Image (cartoon, rainbow, N blue to C red):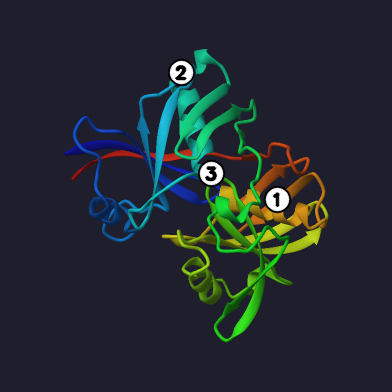
Amino acid sequence: MRIDFLKMQGLGNDFLVFDAPAEAAPDSKALRALADRHTGIGFDQALMLEKPRDPGSRVFYRVFNADGGEVEQCGNGARCVAALMYARAPERGREVLMQSLGGPVRARVREDGQVSVDMGAPNFDPRSLPMEAAAEAPRYPIAIDGGTVEVGAVSMGNPHAVLQVPDAAAAPVGELGPALERHPRFPRRVNVGFMQIVDRGHIRLRVHERGVGETLACGTGACAAVAVGRDWGLLDEEVRVDLPGGTARVSWPGRGGRLWLTGPATTVFTGTVNL
């Protein structure tokens, strides 16, 4: 099976983007092989584009992590898909409606090339992640490695746990990230964000993504960190998020409001691969 693809990236979060083949989609073994950065193409997530399922939508996209597992949503991936849809049909305008397993997604391709995505309203109900908890709370103590850490938990269409740390650069992402990802309180695993609050309009963030490991950027992770930090009363409505791969902007008025993520989305190269 031959696949024509694009390699795209948003803030260093990189993607294999391809139209769904007429034959069966690549299985998890094939995707893991393609994700290998030494013997394959290399990517954090694969984005498979299918025909839209509702009138007015331009595309239905599916998201697969580097381990081959399918997940609900990807913020930077959504921005890359929106940029591609606009490039393919600019005559349809800069407002792009898409669909995913996480629900409908509205995006806007700006004149300066940045792409904004409406990520919906953050869901703090622990059942939405899912997370084992007696009731919703601003912080949850989690016993791990003989100690306890406190996290905020929120769903951005996919599950996130957020820790506040004094210094993101020195945060134990490689140790705590995998341990929390697979903690039994998260039966479908969880993405883990390590957030340093610089001031009320600025955070630094590193993210361990489930099924991938630490990435240069995570769009839904940036959204989750701002949602949790704002819900804790520590952040303003407009927040700059510095990630290892670059800077994103997140805007959220608060509970009940919709959250917008803005940042770059670019094509790195195109190619063809035989499976």
The image shows residue 84 at horizontal and vertical percentages of 46, 30
Q: Nearer the viewer, residue 160 or 78?
A: 160
36 on left or right of 217: left
Residue beneath label 1, please? 227
Q: Amino acid at mark 3?
A: Asn
Image quarter for residue 40? Answer: bottom left
- Image quarter where the C terminus lies is top left
Q: Nearer the viewer, residue 27 or 91?
A: 27
Mark on residue 101? none
**Label located before the other in sequence (2 or 3):** 3
Mark on residue 89? 2
- Judge whether 7 appears above or below 227 on screen: above
- Image quarter where the N terminus lies is top left
SS at circle 1: helix
- Determine the residue positioned at 51% across, 14% down: 92
SS at circle 2: loop
Residue beneath label 3, please? 76
The image shows residue 197 at horizontal and vertical percentages of 76, 62
84 on left or right of 264: left
